[in-house]
Structures are given as structure tokens and as C-alpha cells.
Image (cartoon, rainbow, N blue to C red):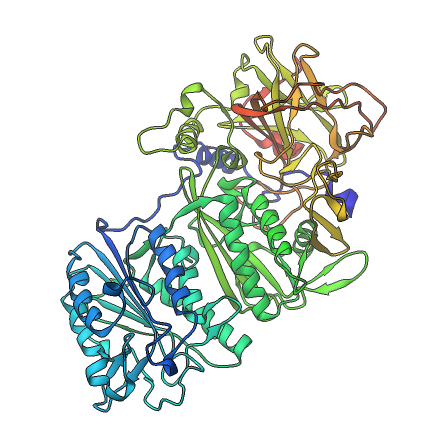
């Protein structure tokens, strides 16, 4: 299996017979302005101010009423709301006396705070504490100084709160109640059973409660929060945006907590807890409570991994796999690749590794190449992952066959400039049950964009962002616009040239809009030759990927033992200190900003040959590039495959690291088959990009059907 993992395959199968016109239409499609970007639905009305009124009481003045984790619930909610642009008012016992949640303070503060909101504003009111039913049969929320024996004079009547919310002019009003805490009744007999009904028919008000009827709001000690509030906060962080709208409405939030809270309550606590809600007249249930906050791709994948690891542990799923992320192209079915190029494969690999590190020995992750191989062998299409069950699906290694418990189905959608929405779903293989979801919005770097498959010559002006743009966002916007231009190598004067070579022959190519295609045959070994034109006078660094795998060894992050991926710490296996040896492994799937870089020195040569995946630099060993499979064009790919048929070369200005001295530059020299003399360098790292090139290799027969003139690169 190890040998097969390093053999690269072809991109070619887009049907047994694809007509000339179909290929032409596909080429025209990828050349349209805004290539790779999809229109995102935006709020129909302008957003106003956002106000969060958070009330939490933990240490009541009557000791028998004391609760736990309420203050932490308030703090966690305050963090996520503040990040979403909310103005936060905390009313807890830890605040100054005038902001403590006594009955008098609440009766003074709530009308004043709610009265600040205008017709375009959003108000979220959150209460965590006790709720009681008085002798008059009315619901009372329990302030800090509540006396359950005299609720009429010490409690906060729900009807009074309803009136204040009805008067509030805010366009969006959400009331969240986390009361009826399990194990905290202390012998009280009038604990509230149904906290949402007093708020029915309140104009414009959406109410979500932590539980229904006579259920209890459970406390999740491992999370230091209530079960309901934990999932509430996670949903507001972006995980509730299952439809990829870029915002989360009250309905989205309710569906999210209603999916996760009951499952965890049953699995972990063996109790029932189902969130409840009421929706008043004229409620805009899909209006944004929060707009999803973009974070780096790595940070988002880490958040997703944290959520999914929790779901896997709760469900007791022993074996889990992450296939290549799919693309939601607003069609009837999901597809693979598409305008996201290598991004889907990279995200799957990264998430698989992050989950392995969070497994804690409670579950195991199937190695990335093995899950792809399993799905490919059984000819499972991406659409099937969301349909019913895949019962009997097993993964096979040399040692064993193991039933697969769940698949993490990742979806890339709605890229607008340097932002993209990512959603992941945990589907049971044997049951067909959706166990949970996680996702959010990622802010892409320039190197993330380079995985999408577009080819551009970078200009200095690309790094001058327009007002309101980040430097990365400005560069990406420029590159997106330039994708309507021909592939840079169509210009014979373009200074950075990349060729596919078999034997001593440079394979010809065909240019189709922004793409360059070259032909290869199954079983062929090929090399990648890089030429620097005479106008290149200085050293250039190059990151080179084949099907998303780095051609240079990368520091080991994971180790493989038979079937499963396991985390390792660095330095490896107990070796400590700064001089400890770091193990490197070949052909790792990495983002371009992580990939090791070649150094091309025009003073030593103008042509550089990369003959395969470098296995060991010190021993001068590499594995040849070999064509072993026929895949499909990324725009129509429905089945999983080991190979993608794409070569990525990104060229950079070298930047000297602080305090470093250049020792030796890297070059390639002819050597025996399978060996090469590699020289190493230090103290340099890639700086600004100079060019991003992609070359797609396909089967000869498919290549001949492509429109356009054949270009001979060896002339």
C-alpha cells in the first residue's frame, strides 16, 4: 500500500465518451469572471445595532438555591456575542452592586436596556437560573434575592418580562431561557415545568428554552457548562449554519440545539432533554442573530475538529473516516473537486489529523489514503454519503478488515473572494443517522487560494489592497479577476516554465482558457522540469505539489500503524531538547504555506529536474512519479479516486531569515535510477509570490479530444 500511495494517477475519466463540445463548454465555464466564487445570500434589510442582555445567577442569597456553571455559561456566551458585534450587558452577582440581578435592578434595567433598541436592531436576552411557579399559578424567573416562599414580591414575573419585550422595537428579538436545572431543586415543589408558554403570541419574539415540560436542564461537568448552553454557544460560533448562508437565524439555532442536546442527554446522562420554543406573530425566524465570523482555515478546521471529536465520543463511534471534502455547486448533487481544486483533499487530510490528535484513545481515524481507496474500490459516489446507510462498508488493511462507524462529510460552498463556508456532517455508516454538524466561515490566505487550480502571473500591484480589504483579500480579488486570462505559459516570454518530461521528451500541451493540459499514459514514469528564462537573475524558491502531495519530505505530524492514523509528538518518541532529531516523511498532503521549498539558483543551472517524490534527502533517494490510474475532470467528478492529475508549482522571492546565513543551495544532478544528489540550504524562506502555475495531465485519448492547437514545448 505504501508504494501505491506515492504513485500519482491521471485526471482523465469524465465519462467513456466525452464530446468535443462538452469539453469546450467546461472550459468556457471555468474561464468566466468570478471563477471559483458563488453569490452569497445577504440579509434583505440593513443590519442595525446588536444588544446582548445576559442574566446569570449562580450563588443565590438563599443557599438552598445555589447553582453551578451559570456564570461560565454567561461568560462563554458573552465571548461569542462580542465577537459577533454585540454590545454586551452582564447582570450577574459578580458585577458591581448596581448591575447585580436583584429584582429591583432587573425591573429598572430591563425596560431601559430594551428601550434602546430601534426598528433595525437585534436584541438577545439570555437568562440562566431558577424558574418557579407561584401560588397564583404564574411563572416567575428567580432574581438573585428571590424567596420561593414569596414569589409575588421577590420573583420576576414572566408576564412582566413579556410586556417589556413586546414594547421593544427591535426587528429581531430572541429570548433564551436555561432554567429548570437538574439536581438543583433542593426539595422545592413549585419548580417551573413549562417556561415558554407565558411568552406565546408576543409580537416579534422568538423564545428558545433549554428543555420541555417536566424535563430538567442537565449540567455537563466535563464542559463546565449546562448541556444546553454549551451547544447554544457552539451554534452561535458558526456551527449552526448548516445551509451555508453566512449567517445564523433563530430557526437555525433552534434546529442545531435540538439536534445535539437530546442526543447527548440520552447518550451521556441517560435522560431526556429536548429544547422547546415558541414563535410569536411577525417573527423573522431566518433573520440573522449573528453573521458568521471568518477565521483562518486552520483555526476553523481546529474548531470543527473539536466539535466533531465531542460528537464522536458521545456517540461511541469507534472507527471514523474523512473522505475528500465535496463541493456544493448549487446543483442537485454534491460533487468533488470543481472550482476548489485541491482544497477538498487538503481539508480532509488536515481534519483527519486534527481528529486523531483529539481521539484520546476513544476512537480511531482511518488513514486518509485508505478511506479514499475504500470508497474508490466500492465505487461509492459522493451523493451516496447523505443517502440512507452504507451498511457493510469496511476498510481493509494488510492486517484486518474493520467496519466503518461513521464518515465525516465535509462540504465547501459559497466562496466569495478570500472567504469560503465549510460545513461538516457526521453520518452513521451502518445507521444512516446524522449524528451532528459543525462548520463556519474561513478566511483564506494567498497560499490557500493557490490550491484552487488557477494559474496567474503575480504583479506587484496585486498586494495593494482596496479600501476595506486585507492584503490577502486584495491579492485574491486580483487573481480571481485574472483567471479569465490565458494560462501564463501561453506567453513564450513568461520567465517561469514547467514541463512534464517522459524520457528526454517534453510532452506537448493544449491551452484551454486558464488551464494547460498535457498527455500521459498509464504506467509511464515522468519527470517535472523547471526552466528559468534568462531574465531571471536571482535565486527563486519553488513549492512543488503533485496531486496535492509535497515533492519534498515534510516534518512528520502523524504516524501510521496498520489501519489507523495516530498522533505523534515532536520531537519524536521521547527525544528532548532543541537538538532532537525530527523525522521527515515523503509525499505529505499540505497547504502551500507549509510545504518545503526548492531553491532554484540560475547561477548553477537554468533547468532543474524533479524526478519524483524525495524520500530521504541525506540518502539521495526518491520515488518516481508514476501514472497508475485514470480519474475525472474536477468539474464533473462524482466518485472518489486516489489521483487528481494536477501539478502545482508556486514561485517565490527568497527572504533571508533573521540571523541566518546561506550555506548551500539545492539543485539536482544526474544520478543512478532512483537516486539524486540533493544539496540543502538554510536561512531562507519563501516571501512574496511571483507566479502560480497548474498543469493538468490526462490520458492521451482524452487529451486529443480537447479543442485548441497543440503546443510543442521541445521546439
Q: Is residue 636 left or right of residue 475?
A: right
Where residue 215 sits, quadrant-wise, is bottom left
Is residue 256 shown to the viewer in this render? no
Q: Where does the image place residue 145, in percent across and percent down from the top left?
A: 27, 77
Residue depicted at x 40% and y 78%: 181
Q: Is residue 617 left or right of residue 314?
A: right
- Residue 709, placed above or below residue 336: above
Q: Where does the image place residue 670, in percent across and percent down from the top left?
A: 80, 19
Front-lying residue, 469 or 413: 469
Is residue 602 shown to the viewer in this render? yes
Where residue 164 sits, quadrant-wise, is bottom left
Q: Is residue 467 left or right of residue 507?
A: left
Q: Where does the image place residue 49, in percent across and percent down from the top left?
A: 22, 52
Where residue 712 sits, quadrant-wise, is top right
Quadrant containing the C terminus is: top right
Residue depicted at x 56% and y 69%: 314
Among all residues in the image, which is located at the extreme right?
672
Residue depicted at x 20% and y 85%: 152
Front-lying residue, 16 or 181: 181
- Residue 238, placed above or below residue 600: below
Q: Total of numbered circles in the picture?
A: 0
Q: Where does the image place residue 149, in percent across and percent down from the top left?
A: 27, 89
Q: Is residue 153 left or right of residue 507?
A: left
Amino acid at each position: 500500500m505504501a508504494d501505491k500511495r506515492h504513485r500519482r494517477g491521471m485526471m482523465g475519466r469524465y465519462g467513456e465518451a466525452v464530446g468535443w463540445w462538452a469539453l469546450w463548454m467546461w472550459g468556457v465555464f471555468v474561464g468566466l469572471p468570478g471563477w471559483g466564487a458563488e453569490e452569497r445570500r445577504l440579509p434583505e434589510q440593513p443590519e442595525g445595532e446588536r444588544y446582548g442582555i445576559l442574566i446569570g445567577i449562580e450563588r443565590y442569597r438563599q443557599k438552598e438555591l445555589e447553582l453551578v456553571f451559570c456564570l461560565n455559561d454567561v461568560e462563554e456566551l458573552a465571548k461569542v456575542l462580542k465577537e459577533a458585534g454585540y454590545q454586551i450587558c452582564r447582570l450577574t452577582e459578580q458585577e458591581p452592586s448596581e448591575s447585580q440581578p436583584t429584582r429591583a435592578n432587573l425591573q429598572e434595567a430591563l425596560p431601559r436596556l430594551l428601550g434602546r433598541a430601534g426598528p433595525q436592531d437585534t436584541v438577545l436576552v439570555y437568562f440562566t437560573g431558577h424558574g418557579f411557579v407561584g401560588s397564583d399559578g404564574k411563572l416567575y424567573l428567580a432574581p438573585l434575592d428571590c424567596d420561593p416562599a414569596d414569589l409575588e414580591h421577590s420573583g420576576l414575573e414572566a408576564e412582566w418580562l413579556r410586556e417589556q419585550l413586546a414594547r421593544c422595537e427591535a426587528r429581531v428579538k430572541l429570548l433564551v431561557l436555561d432554567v429548570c436545572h437538574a439536581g438543583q431543586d433542593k426539595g422545592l415543589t413549585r419548580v417551573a415545568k413549562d417556561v415558554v408558554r407565558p411568552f406565546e403570541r408576543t409580537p416579534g419574539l422568538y423564545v428558545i428554552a433549554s428543555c420541555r415540560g417536566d424535563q430538567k436542564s442537565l449540567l455537563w461537568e466535563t464542559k463546565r457548562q449546562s448541556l444546553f448552553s454549551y451547544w447554544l454557544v457552539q451554534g452561535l460560533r458558526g456551527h449552526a449554519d448548516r445551509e451555508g448562508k453566512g449567517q445564523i437565524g433563530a430557526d437555525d439555532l433552534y434546529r442545531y440545539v435540538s439536534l445535539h442536546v437530546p442526543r447527548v442527554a440520552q447518550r451521556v446522562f441517560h435522560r431526556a432533554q429536548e429544547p422547546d420554543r415558541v414563535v410569536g406573530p411577525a417573527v423573522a425566524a431566518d433573520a440573522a442573530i449573528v453573521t458568521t465570523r471568518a477565521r483562518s482555515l486552520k483555526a476553523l478546521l481546529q474548531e470543527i475538529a473539536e466539535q466533531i471529536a465531542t460528537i464522536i465520543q458521545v456517540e461511541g463511534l469507534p472507527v471514523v473516516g474523512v473522505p475528500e471534502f465535496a463541493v456544493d455547486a448549487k446543483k442537485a448533487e454534491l460533487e468533488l473537486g470543481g472550482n476548489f481544486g485541491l482544497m477538498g483533499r487538503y481539508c480532509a487530510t488536515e481534519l483527519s489529523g486534527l481528529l486523531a490528535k483529539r481521539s484520546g484513545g476513544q476512537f480511531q481515524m482511518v488513514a486518509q489514503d485508505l478511506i479514499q481507496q475504500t470508497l474508490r474500490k466500492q465505487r461509492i459516489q459522493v451523493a451516496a454519503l447523505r443517502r440512507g446507510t452504507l451498511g457493510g462498508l469496511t476498510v481493509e488493511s494488510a492486517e484486518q478488515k474493520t467496519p466503518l462507524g461513521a464518515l465525516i462529510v465535509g462540504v465547501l460552498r459559497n466562496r466569495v473572494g478570500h472567504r469560503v463556508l465549510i460545513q461538516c456532517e457526521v453520518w452513521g455508516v451502518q445507521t444512516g443517522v446524522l449524528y451532528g454538524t459543525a462548520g463556519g466561515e474561513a478566511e483564506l490566505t494567498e497560499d490557500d487560494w493557490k490550491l484552487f487550480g488557477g494559474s496567474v502571473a503575480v504583479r506587484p500591484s496585486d498586494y495593494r489592497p482596496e479600501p476595506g480589504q486585507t492584503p490577502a483579500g486584495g491579492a485574491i480579488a486580483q487573481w480571481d479577476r485574472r483567471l479569465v486570462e490565458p494560462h501564463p505559459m501561453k506567453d513564450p516570454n513568461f520567465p517561469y516554465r514547467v514541463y512534464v518530461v517522459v524520457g528526454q521528451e517534453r510532452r506537448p500541451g493544449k491551452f484551454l482558457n486558464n488551464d494547460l493540459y498535457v498527455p500521459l499514459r498509464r504506467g509511464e514514469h515522468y519527470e517535472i522540469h523547471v526552466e528559468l528564462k534568462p531574465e531571471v537573475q536571482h535565486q527563486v524558491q519553488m513549492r512543488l505539489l503533485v496531486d496535492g502531495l509535497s515533492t519534498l519530505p515534510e516534518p512528520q505530524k502523524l504516524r501510521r500503524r496498520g489501519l489507523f492514523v495516530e498522533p505523534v509528538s515532536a520531537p519524536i518518541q521521547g527525544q528532548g531538547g532543541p537538538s532532537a532529531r525530527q523525522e521527515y516523511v515523503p509525499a505529505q498532503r499540505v497547504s502551500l504555506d507549509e510545504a518545503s521549498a526548492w531553491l532554484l539558483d540560475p547561477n548553477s543551472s537554468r533547468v532543474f529536474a524533479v524526478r519524483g517524490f524525495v524520500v530521504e534527502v541525506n540518502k539521495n533517494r526518491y520515488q518516481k512519479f508514476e501514472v497508475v490510474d485514470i480519474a475525472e475532470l474536477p468539474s464533473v467528478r462524482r466518485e472518489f479516486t486516489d489521483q487528481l492529475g494536477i501539478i502545482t508549482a508556486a514561485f517565490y522571492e527568497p527572504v533571508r531569515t533573521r540571523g541566518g546565513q546561506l550555506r548551500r543551495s539545492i539543485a539536482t544532478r544526474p544520478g543512478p535510477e532512483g537516486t539524486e544528489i540533493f544539496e540543502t540550504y538554510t536561512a531562507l524562506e519563501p516571501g512574496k509570490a511571483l507566479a502560480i502555475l497548474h498543469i493538468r495531465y490526462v490520458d492521451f485519448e482524452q487529451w486529443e479530444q480537447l479543442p485548441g492547437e497543440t503546443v510543442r514545448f521541445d521546439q
